[in-house]
Amino acid sequence: MTNRAKMIVDKDFIVGEVDKRIYGSFIEHLGRAVYGGIYEPDHPSADEQGFRSDVLELVKGLDVPIVRYPGGNFVSGYNWEDGVGPVADRPSRLELAWRTIEPNLVGFNEFVDWCKKANTEAMMAVNLGTRGPEEARNLIEYSNHASGSYWSDLRIKHGYKDPHNIKTWCLGNEMDGPWQIGAKTAVEYGRIANETAKIMRWVDPTIELVACGSSGLGMPTFPDWEATVLDLTYDNVDYISLHQYYGNRDKDTKNFLAQSLGMDSFIQTVISTADYVKAKKRSKKNINLSFDEWNVWFHSNESDRKIEPWSIAPPQLEDIYTHEDALVVGCMLISLLKRADRVKMACLAQLVNVIAPIMTENGGAAWKQSIYYPYMHASLFGRGTVLVPLLKSDKYDSKDYTDVPYVEAVAVHNEELGEVTVFAVNRDLDNARTFDIDLRSFGSFRVIEHIVLENDDLQAVNTAANPDNVKPHANGNAKLEQNGTIEASLSKASWNVIRIKLQ
């Protein structure tokens, strides 16, 4: 074991351009994501629409480019018309996906308003569980058609003269899952998704559409589902979705930190399946990937079983994230970047309170969870072109994975800013590791800063009382060597951001 890792990158050897939407997130009508999360009219920071300004500031700090809405499992039983028009006239409904009451105080137009305040765009999902092409057609007409039709004029009547012009739409959610309201076979879903795509494009030909992939790589129908769905929808959709969550129920940190290798394999299998359908159809068009649900999720499973049904906005899926969770999120961000040529959208699920980087107290504070930081760093500094990472590192084996590199890393070149940013995770739980970065094609450069997220306690968390317990510092020791390489010591169990200015 050499205790030393090395990465070579060349400006002419690229993976692909980063679509900024790879740093998207997700707000579902679930738990306290909306009510008590982004929206709390009685909160001291609430604006004139009831949105929490403190939460908005934390969201803006992430520079989130797109947010998926309104679900999730929720959307498969949702009537979008319940959430528009005068709030006093909106019905309360039994919400069957999460067994709560949905008061419909926040709906489509309010969410679009919130997106503008958060400097983000909306990724809308349509209900293909209990509803179908007709309702999706009506919604996109309401949203995107200028005027002169029933639904567009209704939007104007509701106070929104200009169309919302939402460009990205998801055709349902996890339709293969037996837990899903209105679950379908691949053929059933592929047919209704294709007809919905056709009719939505007839209303607005400029939109992009995401077909549902498998609900996870563990589904027994994966990847046959993708092959069948794409065979039926290929000409009318642009993306296929991926969903996957990761956890450490067995308290096996080495295996937990290796789970991004499973994410790598998942991405590659979906790319291969999409390209198989492309070849079968003799198509010139690529189907790209929308990894529109990903995160660590396991901490809250037990407490969620104890929630009484039919309450409004109970504290569901409120994982409290540890330092080791942040390392796994960092590894997953690196996995997404390594396939930036085909992964063009991704959504950290979710954004506030529900398996989220941001937590709130009702009536009280908002704070950053440990996973906020790698997500923020990648979003702020990971824009540009991903370079092919030629990485050499010692490896280990875990319960489910072999040849796991101790150092996981990727580099992004932002030509406009004249910067290269290296993201690196040291999976070694016991030792710091020396990391050499060879930027041989870039000429002269200097290190701007080396940000480190480290903690002696892998289970350390942030709370309202101690919101800075897990927090990065900029005291990393990356430095330029005389031979023109950069050398850094990566602390044990750490997330690292090394920012380099090109001269």
Image (cartoon, helix red, strand yellow):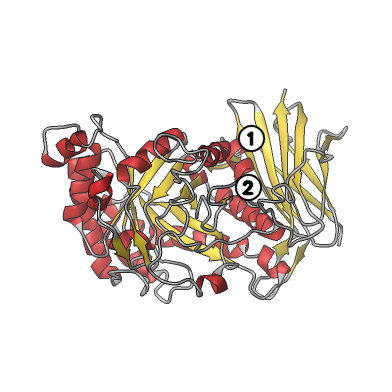
Question: Residue at coordinates 16% horizontally, 41% vertically from top-left?
Answer: 151
Vertical arrangement, residue 479 with respect to residue 355, above or below = above
Which image quadrant for residue 165? top left
Q: Is residue 24 left or right of residue 454?
A: left
Question: Residue at coordinates 35% horizontally, 41% vertically from top-left?
Answer: 110
Foreground: disc 2 or disc 1: 2
Residue with the mark numbered 1: 11
The C terminus - image quarter: top right
Q: Is residue 391 left or right of residue 366?
A: right
Residue located farthest toward the top when viewing the structure as drawn: 503
Mark number displayed over residue 368: 2
The percent position of residue 136, horizontal first and vertical second, equals: 22, 51
Which image quadrant for residue 117? top left
Report the Cα–Cα distance between label 2 and label 1.
35 Å
Mark number displayed over residue 24: none
The percent position of residue 454, horizontal first and vertical second, equals: 77, 51
Q: Secondary structure at mark 1?
A: loop
Mark 2: amino acid: Lys
Q: Is residue 65 left or right of residue 142?
A: right
Q: Secondary structure at mark 2?
A: strand
Which image quadrant for residue 262? bottom right
Numbered circles on residues, count = 2
Toward the viewer: 255 or 464? 464
The percent position of residue 348, horizontal first and vertical second, equals: 52, 52
Say which label, 2 or 1, has the lower sequence index.
Answer: 1
The percent position of residue 391, horizontal first and vertical second, equals: 71, 51
Question: Residue at coordinates 27% horizontally, 38% vertically from top-left?
Answer: 206
Toward the viewer: 43 or 170? 43
